[in-house]
Image: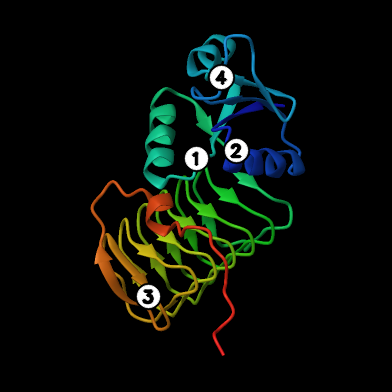
Amino acid sequence: MTHVAIFGAGHQGQVALEILQAAGRSVTAFVDKDRATSSGGTLASLPVWSEEQFERASRADEMEVFVAIGNNNVRLHLSERLREAGYRLCNAIHPSAVVMRSARLGTGILLCPQAFVGANSIIEDDAVINTKASVDHDCHIGPGAYLAPGIITAGCVRVGRCAFIGIGASLGPNVQVGDGAIVGAGALVLDSVGANAFVAGVPARFIRRMVPPVDWSAVLARPPGLIEEPEE
């Protein structure tokens, strides 16, 4: 069996670990320069290597890799660099995910529990289809795109390179979401979204233009607080 090294030892790395293990894959180590230590750090009982340690411990023909980094641009660029170095990127597909027979998948894809990919749909390299996200028939999800938990697309939807679709959003039939665009959580998108646009609401409306490279965590973060009772 070919072993797998996971690049990224954060939250997404731990999700990828459990999905790969559920799919029967053997994971050797995490690779994360920010978390690696010379004394041999561990996460989930696995070693955390630097890239230098990974290169010393592996050969491109002996180990597959999976990049588990939430930032779309960083994930895509690192995956491309690893491919150029000769490494094979595997998919992490949970056994409960459903992929229709006519769908086509690239490599480096994360398909989380109960995700669905419909007939004749295309999922390109390094995309994330999160928990219970549903991609209906004849859709095209571009490289590095991120579909958050619970999103729903109708048929014939196109999501561009490194676009981000927020949790629980719905995309109507034939909608196109441009490269680098962001769809806010819970949005209802019935019209196409331009490249690098941020849209939100029901129905979705244009909020502002994003300047690449986008830090999605900063854009979508809301400070924690209390939901106060209304005044009487």
Q: Classify 10 Å Cα crowding around label 2: few (below 14), some (14-19), many (20 and above).
A: many
Residue of label 2:
13
Which kind of residue does numbered mark 1 sit on?
A: Ile
Which kind of residue does numbered mark 3 sit on?
A: Val
Which kind of residue does numbered mark 2 sit on?
A: Gly
Q: Residue 145 location, x and y as percent? A: 43, 54
Which badge, 4 or 1, is on the more N-terminal residue?
4
Q: What secondary structure is found at the residue carrying circle 2? A: helix
Please name the residue shown 58% across and 32% down the image: 9
Residue of label 4:
36
User: Do the residues bearing badges 3 and 2 touch, measured as CB atoms within 8 Å?
Assistant: no
- Image mark count: 4
Front disc: 3 or 2: 2
Q: CA distance from mark 1 to mark 2?
A: 7 Å
> Is residue 102 positioned above or below 41 on the image?
below
Residue of label 1:
69
